[in-house]
Amino acid sequence: MVVKGRIVWVSGPAVKADGMAAAKMYETVEVGEDKLIGEIIRLTGDIAFIQVYEATSGIRPGEPVLGTGQPLSVTLGPGMMGKIYDGLQRPLDEIAAKAGAFISRGMSAEPIPHEKKWHFTPQLRTGESVEPGFILGKVEETPLITHSIMVPPRTSGEIIDLVREGDHTVDEVIAKIRRNGETSELTMVQRWPVRRPRPYLERFDPEVPLITGQRVLDTFFPIAKGGTGAIPGGFGTGKTVTLHQIAAWADARVVFHVGCGERGNEMTEVLIEFPKLKDPASGRSLMERTILVANVSNMPVAAREASIYTGITMAEYYRDMGYDVVLVADSTSRWAEALREISGRLEEMPAEEGYPSYLASRLAEFYERAGRVRTLGQPERIGSVTLVGAVSPSGADFTEPVTTHTMRFIRTFWALDTRLAYSRHYPAVNWMISYSGYLDFIQKWWSSKVDKDWNRLRAQAYELLQREDALKEIVRLLGPEALPDEEKLVLDVARMLKLGLLQQSAYDPIDTYCSPQKQVKLLRIFVDFYKEALAALRAKVRLDEIRSMPIIPRLLRAKYEIPDAELNRLDQLHAQTLQAFQELTRGLEAKAVAE
């Protein structure tokens, strides 16, 4: 039965309609004569409160509201990879080809190409029994991504017909499945409600790190595959560039970039730069394994709320194929602001700073959809969705509601510092505020795959940074000369760590990505430099002589000069550092003998 109501009240993106007693919560509706897309977010008697995902100017009371009987859903199938969608999974490039630079209301286009033929290769045979998640066949979506055509959830039975290998469109029936006398016809397309997580068999502990190639993240505050992270920071601290680096270099197979309420020029940079980026593993375009969801600040505010769910639902679909997926959302603060505006329009009781009282539960719903899981069906597959959300607190105030609530549901916190950014230290991650809850889980991976000393070296380097932070107050009050030489050495080596390890240039061809092996070798050089320098000090070598060692500038330049393909040069540099200290100590001994 089609529910038909009538608009009785309009306030920005919020609309009330009466005659909607038979409607359901979160049902998608068509609003007004232009059939604008909306979603029911509250039902009171026969009054439905609707958030409209397009501009509502010109809509009048009395215009019709038609229910579709379906929740807000996305279309899942071959042809998604490389696309640029808006928050409702409408392909922006195709709409722009129809409408030009300005997209008018009510325009839509199919999310995936229905006329294109894909080469389908069956993986099963007629007569086999299948359950949800079984892979019926595969198509090559891009040269980097093989798309698995899976049995949808809640569908099972015996295959009574399966097409042969060949070229087919996404709408052609590729399999017929019979169960209890009823036959289901399957195509390459699935529809899935965006607010409902896709099912899986088992969730694993976060034991495998997501390597981003960014030293301060991987070495000091790592995130696991299937983990959750947040990047809060004030204006100009580099949130967007950091997210770009994660998206471009993380060792995930599929990348989602959700631009939620960001400024148009920043999103334009993403749309222009991403197609130019090369996949580090294959050398092909990064867009061949990337999907962009663009919902900028001048688009209808309600669509921001949908864009987050649209992105995570598509990400879960590729996770179900057995891929590691990373989704970066820029930014969840704009999403929360959309919730606040709609809540205000609906005259709901505001909580702290005007945000709705359900802000925390909505953030929890989003972040809990991350995870590394065993998927449904056969063959057995393990996939993951890693979520990283940027937070834009006003005035870089980390005590505001979005940041504080986000910290409750994430386990990796990369806090960006305006003072570091203004001093041109990028990534501007404050190592005293940031933290990672995955260290205990991923130690085994680093020890077995990279270096058994990783955790020890990391702890020693981090202790130096902590000691330097404690000494800064004394230096501020009394000056550096008030410190003994051993504590001056701590300040010197901490500065070397910041310049030679923590700072990283996103625009340098060598330094933009740092492999785990290179990270550990650099870390070992600086930690051993401190140990040797401390031993030299205690052997009566003057601090000025240590500070003037010719090897120090070479250590600071190593990150730029030594590529990942020549890591043996870092071993040579480490040996030369130890030799330089031996010569320094021998020179002191020879001087003492001569005297």
Image: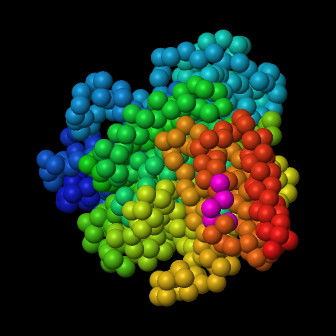
Residue 581, position as x, y percentages in the image: 77, 61
Q: Is residue 451 above or below residue 163?
A: below
Which of the two residues, 489 or 342, is positioned nearer the viewer here? 489
Residue 559, position as x, y percentages in the image: 62, 47
Residue 112, position as x, y percentages in the image: 48, 28
Q: Going 28% across and 24% down the picture, which residue do you hit?
A: 98
- The reply to whether residue 505 is visible in this rendering is yes
Q: How is the image coloured?
A: rainbow
Locate the N terminus and report the quarter of the image it occupies. top left
Q: Going 85% across and 71% down the picture, which residue do you hit?
A: 593
Locate the C terminus and report the quarter of the image it occupies. bottom right
Please indicate whether residue 546 sits to the left or right of residue 246 in the image: right
Any magenta on residue 549?
Answer: yes
Q: Residue furthest front?
A: 595
> Looking at the rendering, which quadrant does residue 228 occupy?
bottom right
Q: Going 27% across and 40% down the picture, which residue do you hit?
A: 35
Any magenta on residue 81?
Answer: no
Q: Is residue 456 above or below residue 79?
A: below
Q: Going 67% across and 69% down the picture, which residue do you hit?
A: 462
Q: Is residue 2 above or below residue 433?
A: above
Q: Which residues are magenta?
A: 546-550
Please indicate whether residue 210 sits to the left or right of residue 113 in the image: right
Task: Determine the main secondary structure of the stretch shown in magenta.
Answer: loop
Which of the two residues, 212 or 165, is positioned nearer the viewer here? 212
- The reply to whether residue 368 is visible in this rendering is no
Residue 557, position as x, y percentages in the image: 60, 48
